[in-house]
Amino acid sequence: MTDEAQVQSLYEQAAARFGTIDVSIQNAGVITIDYYDRMPKADFEKVLAVNTTGVWLCCREAAKYMVKQNHGSLINTSSGQGRQGFIYTPHYAASKMGVIGITQSLAHELAPWNITVNAFCPGIIESEMWDYNDRVWGEILSTEQKRYGKGELMAEWVEGIPMKRAGKPEDVAGLVAFLASDDARYLTGQTINIDGGLIMS
């Protein structure tokens, strides 16, 4: 998602194969976790490049086809950290807040062509990324008094969710399917939390 030529080629091939580009979901994302004074600049730049610039590039290329069609749906993955920052991940929070800004800006610009642009903010979702988060945050947040084993930190955080469980990929898929459907054709510029009530708006 960070190579401009590859992104352009991706949408050219999709349009050639399917005839139209009706929906584009920007879902790639990376994270690293580190102390503020140890985080390499390269890590900061990579997270911004994938999570924010990559979203913008895909939206830009998809929208070129959607404008010609006079319809389309762009759906962007933000995060709970797009709503509020969290410890040891300033780059990730910045990148996901940026996604919300891109979403709102493009929603204004593309509305005349019946193109909707929305985002969603997943909370704790069962995934490889959360396995990584559990391990690395667990190491950093462990103290002599309390050591976090595998799954223990996530279990502790899940207790703070009103629905008392982590989300499943299927939970997110249901929301994305709605945003991609005609039922959401009058919904644009919105960012929806899907986190079991962890962050309420």
Image (tube, rainbow, N blue to C red):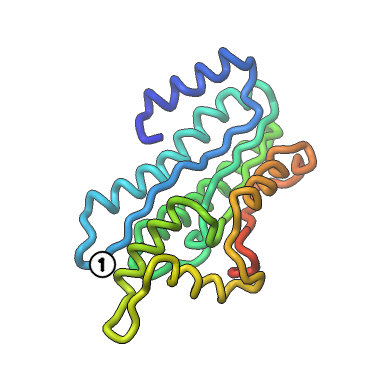
Image coordinates of residue 134 in percent, x first then y, are 40, 63
Q: Residue at horizontal 51%, vertical 46%? A: 102
Residue identified by numbered label 1 = 36
Q: Quadrant of residue 110?
A: top right
Q: Is residue 71 left or right of residue 154?
A: right
Q: Given the current orientation, which residue lies at the most extreme top position?
A: 16
Q: Quadrant of residue 147?
A: bottom left
Q: Residue at horizontal 35%, vertical 67%? A: 137
Please tell me whether residue 146 is drawn above or below residue 79 in the rendered image.
Answer: below
Image coordinates of residue 154 in percent, x first then y, are 47, 68
SS for callout 1 = loop
Q: Given the current orientation, which residue lies at the most extreme front position?
A: 149
Q: Given the current orientation, which residue lies at the most extreme bottom position?
A: 145
Three-letter amino acid code at the position of disc 1: Tyr
Q: Is residue 183 left or right of residue 74?
A: right
Q: Is residue 189 left or right of residue 48?
A: right
Q: Residue at horizontal 35%, vertical 57%? A: 91
Crowd around label 1: few <14 · some 14–19 · many ≥20 (10 Å): few
- Total marks drawn? 1
Please tell me whether residue 86 is drawn above or below residue 60 in the rendered image.
Answer: below
**Quadrant of image for the C terminus:** bottom right
**Quadrant of image for the N terminus:** top left
Image coordinates of residue 106 in percent, x first then y, are 57, 42
Q: Quadrant of residue 148?
A: bottom left
Q: Residue at horizontal 26%, vertical 67%? A: 36
Q: Nearer the viewer, residue 174 or 94?
A: 174
